[in-house]
Image: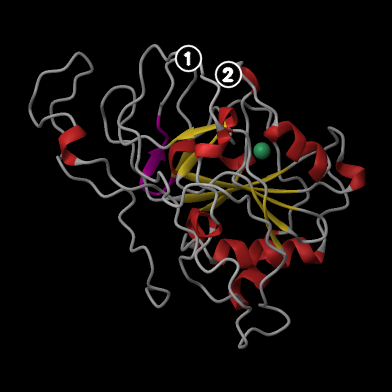
Amino acid sequence: MVEVASNLRPESSTTCAIIPSLAPDPPAIIDIRVEDFSAARFRQGLGRLIDSLSNENTADPPEIIAPANPTNYGDRFFFDIYGNSGYYPPIVVLHETVATVNQTLNFFQTPHLDEDDQVSYHTLISLLGEIIYMVPPDKRAFGAGNSIFANQDGEEAVQTNPHYPPSVNNFAYHISLESPDDGLNNGRTHSGYTEAQYRSLAWLVAKTGVPEDRITTHKRVDRSGDRMDPRSFDKDYFLAWYQIMPKDQAIFIGCAAPPVSLQPPFGSPSPLGINELPLIQTYPNLPRSSPSNP
Ligand SMILES: [Zn+2]
């Protein structure tokens, strides 16, 4: 099932913003109608006829587009607030809602002018396995405030707001699983997620092109010390589903590099210390559509 808002301009604004302001203006009320929420922006091929080669296990799950209010997400930035590159390869961050899917949708579709209330995921997965796209993947969902992705190469985080610590949001794709009834509280564990959720999650992650070692959880990237989601997540069961799913890059995480004319000139002095920047950087450096690409 695909429901798409109509009467929207056809082109999408998928170019990265340049650099965050050190003193951000108060958020404006954004006219949601000027945003492009076409299905292809969320996933290439969405809305086409189901692939006849799909079998019961790998067939497309139900997909719904339910855009979050634009106050609850932002642009991905080409540079951080200090003028350094804001680029890292994409990661997938898994969460749970600790609320019903309808409560979560309501909250994300409500305008929030206070920065402290602005939160979002890119995509929700209901207990029934429905995939609900809320924030386009070229945009920065506010899913993990104070966070760092640590791997063998070091620590990855980008500061895009002078009022908040660095986070992974600039290069993350946030997916949240609807919590079961006995998980609508702050307990340490619950009864876990449905088989339909694991199957849909595996199907969705397999469409991002993100390698297995860059799939992580809110608990692992959190640096605030109080996030433990997704609780009771069975990683091995997820991976068993993930391995059978066809891999492609139908979901493109990231945005196009801004025009060179808009980027800070190489070597120019700047109050932000921009002086050693490459003029051209593809963000991210991934092909847009080559399903056979390893
Ligand atoms: Zn979370």
The quarter of the picture showing ligand 1: top right
Q: Nearer the viewer, residue 287 or 245?
A: 287
Q: Is residue 183 above or below residue 17?
A: below
Q: Residue at x 56, y 48 (%)?
A: 7
Report the number of numbered marks.
2
Under mark 1, the amino acid is His
- Tell me residue 33's x, y (percent): 56, 38
Q: Nearer the viewer, residue 182 or 280?
A: 280
- Whether residue 45 appears in magenta in the rendering, the answer is no
Q: Quadrant of residue 72?
A: top right
| SS type, badge 2 | helix
Side of 225 relative to 77 (left or right): right
Please say whether residue 237 is visible from this viewpoint: no
Secondary structure, mark 1, is: loop
Residue in the picture at 22% in, 46% down: 281
The residue singled out by tag 1 in the image is 163
Where residue 53 sits, quadrant-wise, is bottom right
Residue 214 point in image, percent of width and height:
48, 54
**Residue that sits furthest to the front in the current view:** 7
Q: Evaluate if marks 2 and 1 touch, with contact meaning CB atoms under 8 Å apart.
A: yes
| Relative depth, front residue between 210 and 219 | 210
